[in-house]
């Protein structure tokens, strides 16, 4: 079963690639304070390489939400908010080459709906104007020119690949529920657990997943040129499939299938947070599909 994922954010101004905006950054560093920057596993690996430490060390030192969000624990600055852990006062981003997609795009955002990619900014007014009004005196450029200048292509490829992985994990959870006899047994607990997990924090989901699976998800042990995001993501998918296959090969009883369907869905939801999807929307959509295919809640 193929499930579709869309990332929806409300109250955004959707942009055309040809829209011309004051996108030249004044380099005041305001947006490196008090912001929320999600990172996928490839971005984490790239940042770690840039800092010349292991992915595991980067996760421990510079991330929160168990590896899916950059830690903002630096000095207090703009608007009384703390700087990103990668921000150096007076210099800027210490990981500039490896900065995540969210930073490359800012003040723009990206959303995918029905397989189409849109760029937008939050709210009605151009976000930089709040703290960096001087951008109005700097050169304007089109959205397309901005994306090229920020070299977003590799980062967008990785983001798309991880969205697909979320979908793949959800597909596996569906197979465990619908093709194993679990749904036919009259089971209601699986969908109840899925709904419960939609409201759980990344830390709660990580606890359900357990340390080994969390490591496989966020810091895969891959010896791949970091500048090849597609290859990195492909190998990450293969690695997860291999480990999952091995772990599921002895699954036999209804209880074991239920545990597996809940575990794999927890992994899908955890990863969905890293790519900016909304777990509540995903779960509600997926539960509807499961019910239409005979599962009960
Ligand atoms: S808010 Fe805009 S202009 Fe100011 S530092 Fe951030 S990207 Fe640059
Ligand atoms: S990673 Fe760099 S660009 Fe992004 S918020 Fe942190 S300091 Fe700013």
Image (spheres, rainbow, N blue to C red):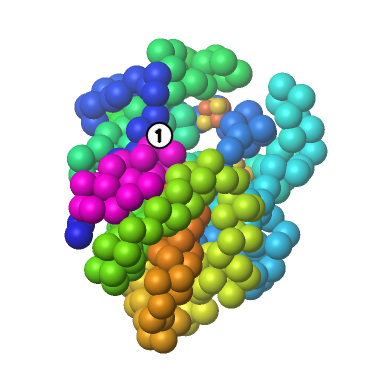
**Percent from the top left, x then y, of residue 48?**
60, 65
Q: In the displayed structure, does residue 217 sit left or right of residue 282?
A: right
Residue 279 sits inside the magenta stretch: yes
Query: Residue 281 sits in which quadrant?
Result: top left
| Picture residue at 70% right of the left edge, 62% below the top | 60
| Picture residue at 38% right of the left edge, 47% below the top | 297
Q: Do we see residue 158 in this rendering?
A: no
Tell which of 202 and 148 is nearer to you. Answer: 202
| Numbered marks: total | 1
- SS class, disc 1: strand
Compared with residue 125, is residue 174 higher up or lower down, i.e. above or below? below
Compared with residue 88, is residue 186 higher up or lower down, i.e. above or below? below
Ligand 2 quarter of the rendering: top right
Q: In the displayed structure, does residue 83 sit left or right of residue 32?
A: right
Q: Is mark 1 within 8 Å of ligand 1?
A: no
Query: Residue 237 sits in which quadrant?
Result: bottom left
Neighbour class for label 1 at 10 Å: few (<14), some, many (≥20)?
many
Q: Residue furthest front?
A: 186
Which stretch is magenta? 277-297
Compared with residue 15, is residue 230 higher up or lower down, i.e. above or below? below
To which residue does mark 1 refer?
A: 109
**Percent from the top left, x then y, of residue 247?**
45, 82
| Picture residue at 66% right of the left edge, 32% below the top | 34
**Percent from the top left, x then y, of residue 196?**
51, 46
Residue 269 sits inside the magenta stretch: no
Compared with residue 255, is residue 159 higher up or lower down, i.e. above or below? above
**Percent from the top left, x then y, of residue 216?**
51, 73
| Picture residue at 31% right of the left edge, 32% below the top | 119
Q: Do we see residue 33 in this rendering?
A: yes
Q: Quadrant of the N terminus?
A: bottom left
What is the magenta segment's predominant secondary structure? helix
């Amino acid at each position: 079963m193929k499930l579709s994922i869309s990332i929806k954010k409300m109250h955004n101004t959707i942009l055309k690639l040809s829209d011309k905006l004051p996108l030249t950054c004044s380099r005041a560093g305001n947006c490196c304070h008090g912001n929320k920057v999600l990172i996928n596993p490839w971005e984490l690996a790239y940042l770690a390489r840039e800092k010349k430490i292991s992915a595991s060390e980067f996760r421990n030192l510079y991330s929160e939400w168990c590896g899916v969000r950059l830690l903002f624990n630096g000095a207090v600055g703009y608007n009384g908010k703390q700087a990103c852990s990668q921000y150096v006062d007076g210099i800027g981003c210490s990981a500039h080459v490896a900065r995540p997609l969210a930073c490359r795009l800012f003040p723009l955002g990206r959303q995918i709906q029905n397989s189409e990619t849109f760029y937008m900014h939050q709210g009605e007014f151009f976000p930089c104007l709040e703290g960096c009004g001087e951008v109005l005196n700097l050169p304007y450029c089109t959205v397309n020119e901005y994306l090229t200048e920020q070299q977003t292509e590799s980062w967008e490829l990785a983001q798309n690949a991880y969205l697909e992985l979320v979908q793949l994990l959800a597909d596996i959870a569906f197979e465990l529920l619908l093709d194993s006899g679990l749904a036919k047994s009259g089971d209601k607990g699986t969908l109840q657990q899925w709904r419960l997990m939609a409201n759980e924090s990344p830390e709660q989901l990580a606890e359900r997943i357990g340390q080994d699976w969390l490591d496989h998800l966020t810091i895969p042990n891959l010896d791949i040129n970091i500048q090849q995001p597609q290859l990195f993501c492909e190998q990450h998918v293969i690695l997860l499939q291999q480990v999952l296959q091995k772990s599921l090969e002895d699954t036999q009883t209804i209880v074991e299938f239920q545990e597996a369907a809940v575990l794999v869905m927890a992994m899908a939801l955890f990863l969905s947070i890293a790519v900016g999807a909304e777990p509540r929307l995903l779960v509600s959509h997926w539960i509807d599909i499961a019910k239409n295919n005979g599962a009960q809640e």
